[in-house]
Amino acid sequence: PFNRKPPNCGVFFGPGVSDTYIGGTDPASRNIIGEALTDGIRIGTDISANTHANSIINNYIGVGWGGGGFTNRGNAFEGIHVYGNGNTISGNVIGYSGLDGINIYGALAHNNLIEDNFVGVSDDGMALANASRGVRVDGDSNENRIRTNTVAHKHGEGRRRRKRAEKHNRPDSRIQHGREREEQDPLPARRHQ
């Protein structure tokens, strides 16, 4: 019988991949990436520095849409696993991951922008809990920007930065009552199309 589940990652950006878009600003460009046996999306590897300048925009990762609400299409490991540099992850709804919603890992993971994502929660407040952290920044990753995300309903911490990564990354937002958002400007509500 036909098996729709990806055998490994849902989407893998291999060594040398750059300037590639998954999704886009038009809702018709949105993808549903779920039920992968490892990561929903993996950008690069921990031994290749040249996976860069890719964009993951306005996708449903680990969640589906049907019957007027989100459904569980969780990926077994990370929703998005970032090893590369200079990538943009924006406007996605990420939920039901077996580990972290987003994991930025290693010395090659630098200058990435993580903004305006809903991690573990939909834009209208529905719980889409990830099994571990909402956003994890680890290893020797550096100069990553994490801002204006909403992170909630996680089983571990909302955002975790290990000591090596702590002084080299710049989160411009905070977690309060299970939600991470920038101090000043509230996030606009988004409607599904």
Image (tube, helix red, strand yellow):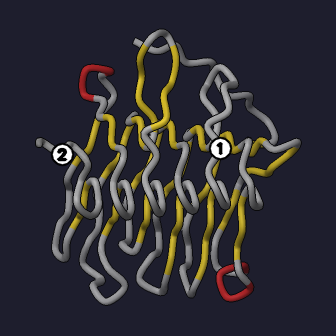
Q: Residue at x 26, y 48 (%)?
A: 5
Which residue is the site of mark 1?
129
Residue 177: quadrant of the picture:
top right
**Residue at horizontal 16%, vertical 74%?**
16
- Residue 31 at x, y percent in the picture: 29, 34
Say which amino acid is labelled 2: Asn
The crowd level at tag 2 (other Cα within 10 Å; few <14, some 14-19, many 20+) is few
Image quadrant in which the C terminus is located: top left
Q: Position of residue 57 (x, y in %)?
A: 37, 40
Q: Vertical placement of 168 versus 104: above or below?
A: below
Describe the element under mark 1 as helix, strand or loop.
Answer: loop
Quick one: label 2 or label 1, which is nearer the N terminus? 2
Spot occupied by residue 90 in the image (x, y as percentages of width and height): 46, 43
Picture layout, residue 193 above or below residue 72? above
Q: Which mark is residue 3?
A: 2
| Residue at horizontal 71 percent and vertical 80 percent from the top | 162
